[in-house]
Amino acid sequence: MSMLKISGLHVGYGNIEVLHGLNIEVNEGELVTIIGPNGAGKSTLLKTISGQLAPISGTIEFEGKPIQGMPPHKIVQMGISQCPEGRKLFSRSTVSENLLIGAYIRNNKAEAKVDSEKYMARFPVLGARRNQPAGTLSGGEQQMLATSRAMMSHPKIVLLDEPSMGLAPQLVKEIFKMIREIKKDGGTILLVEQNAAMALKIADRAYVLETGQISLEGKARDLLHNDSVRKSYLGEETSETKLP
Amino acid sequence: MNFFLQQLANGLAAGSIYALIAVGYSVIYGALQMVNFAHGNIYMFGTFMFMAVTTATKNIFLGVLVGVVCSGALAMAVERFAYRPVRKANYLVPMISAFGAALIIQNICQLLFSTRTFPFPASVPNLFIDIGSIRISVYQLAIFVVALIIMLVITFLLKRTRLGQAVNCVSQNKVSSELMGINVNSIISLIYCAGAVVGVVGGMFFALYYNSIFIGMGFLGTMKGWIAAVVGGIGNIKGTFIAGIILGLVEAFGSAFISSAYRDVISYAVVIIVLIWKPNGLFGSQIAEKA
C-alpha cells in the first residue's frame, strides 16, 4: 500500500483551477520528485497536501486515511512535515530555537534537544550560529536550517518545496546530499524541484507536472534519458533545439 | 515626606490600573501586530458583568470570576466573528471591524445597564498600614501587587512555556507556525482572551479605585492604557507595564505639585517628549532582519 496516494485532485484559487485531476503515489521509503516549469502548480500541490489549501475535488490519502481539507496542524500531527518554499524561518528566533520549534508536536523535549544538537553538529555553520537570529543567516544556511527544522518532528514523510531555489551550485550539492541522507535513514520524501537534473539523479520515481497536469511519469532514471525531458528540463541540445 | 509618599501610593495604584489595561493591548499587539480597538469596551462589559453578579449574589469573588470569564469569552467571540473572517484583508479592514464590534458591545451594555454611573458594588473596608507617621492604604498597595503578579505571570508564560513558544512563532509567521503543528486559530483566540482577562482586572480595579462603573470607562481607560502602551513600546509587555506605572506617577505628582486641572495636559506632554526622544517608545526595539 502506498503511504501517500493522491487521486483525481483538482485544486484552484477562487474560480481559477490550477491542478486538473492529479494522480500521484508515494511509497514508504521512496524519494519521489515532481519536476516542471514555473507556474505548473507544484507548490499548490504541496500546499494542498499540507492542508493550507482545500481541494475542489479528489482525495489525498495518507496511510489509507483521507486527509484532504484537514487543518495543517492536524496533518503535521499525522506525520507529514513540509519545508515550505522560500524557507519561511522564524527570523527573529535563534537557530536553535527554530530547530526546537520544529519538534513542537513532540512531547519529549529532552529528546528534541538532543536531535537539535545532532543537526547543529551535522551542519557546523548552524552550530556556530546557534544563538544568532535565523534572519541573519545566508540563503544556504537558511535552507539547511529549514530542512532540519522540517525533520525535527520525526515525520513519516517530508515534503520539500524547491530546496535548491536561489542557492549557489556548491550549496545545492550540500542540500541534495542532505536529502540523500534523509532517504538513507529510511525517510520518505516528496521533492518538488525546478532543478530537474539534480532531482532526477537522486529520486526513485518522478512526475513531470505541466500546467496543472501530469504529462509524464516513471522511474527517475528513465526520465533522465527521456528525450522530451532532456530537451525541456535538462537544457540539453537536441536536433530540434540546435542552432543551425 | 508624608505627602510625597502618599502621592507615590496614589500614583502606583493609578499607574497599575493603566498598566493592566495597557498590557491587555500590548499582549495582542505584540503577538498579532493588531490594535484591538474593541479592548476598552470588552473589559467595560466584563466590569459590568462583575457588578451585576456581585450585586445579585453579594459574593464579590463570584463576581470577579464571572467578570473575568465574560471578558475572555467576549474577546474570543469578537475575534471569531469580527476579526478572523477579515484576517487576511488589508490591515484597515479589521480596524473598522473592531470599531463595529466596540459599538455593538457598548450599545448592548447601554441596553442592559442604562447610561448611569454606578458605584462599586461591594463595600471594601478601607484599611491602612501605618508606618511611623506614614499611612498607606491597603487596597492601593494590593492593586499594585496584583498588577505586578499578573505581569510576571504573563512574562513567564510567554518566555518559558510551550504556549509562549507557539505565541512567539505565530507573531512571526502564521504559515510556518501551522506547518510546525501549531493550531494558529486557537492560539490567536487565546491571545485575545488573555488580553481581555488582563484588561478586565484593570477595569475592576478602576471601578474600585474611582468608585464608579459607567459606559464610558472603556474609552477613558483605553486612552490612558493606549498612551502607556505606546510610550512603553507597544508589544513589549515589560515596557508597557513600566510606562503605565510612570504615567500614574506623573499624574499623581503633577496633580499634587502643579495643579490637578493640568493632570491630563502633563501626561500628554510627557508622551510627546518621550516620543520625540524615542519614537519607538521607551522599550521598543528596532529589529534588523534579512527577509
Image: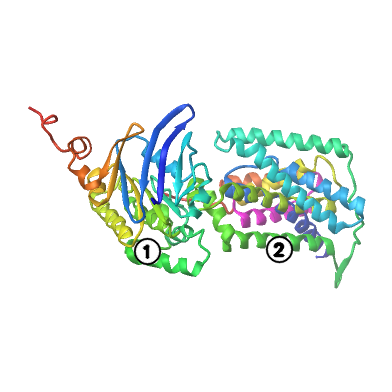
Is the C terminus of chain A in the top left, top right, bottom left or bottom right quadrant?
top left
Marked residue chain, label 1: A
Tell me where residue B136 appears, x and y as whole percent. 84, 65
Does B75 sit left or right of A78 as displayed?
right
Q: Is residue B234 visible?
A: no
Tell me where residue A135 appears, x and y as whole percent. 41, 52
Report the front residue among A10 and A128. A10
In this figure, which residue is indicated by the disc labeled 2? B149
Q: Residue at x 31, y 46 (%)?
A: A33
Q: Is residue A86 visible?
A: yes
Which residue appears farthest toward the front when viewing the image?
A1
- Identify residue type, mark 2: Ile
In magenta stretch: residue B238: yes
- Identify residue type, mark 1: Tyr
Q: Residue at x 67, y 56 (%)?
A: B241
Q: Main secondary structure of the magenta part?
A: helix
Q: Which mark is residue A119?
A: 1
Tell me where residue B232 appears, x and y as whole percent. 62, 52
Q: Residue at x 49, y 70 (%)?
A: A110
Which residue appears farthest toward the left when viewing the image?
A244
Mark 1 secondary-structure assignment: helix
Rendered position, B72 above or below B93: below
Rendered position, A124 above or below B218: below
Residue B124 lies in quadrant: bottom right
Rendered position, B270 above or below B135: above
Residue A38 lies in quadrant: top left
Tell me where residue B101 appears, x and y as whole percent. 71, 36
Report the front residue among A110 and B87. A110
Q: How far is disc 1 from disc 2 in space, using C-alphas?
A: 39 Å
Mark 2 secondary-structure assignment: helix
Q: Which residues are magenta?
A: B235-263
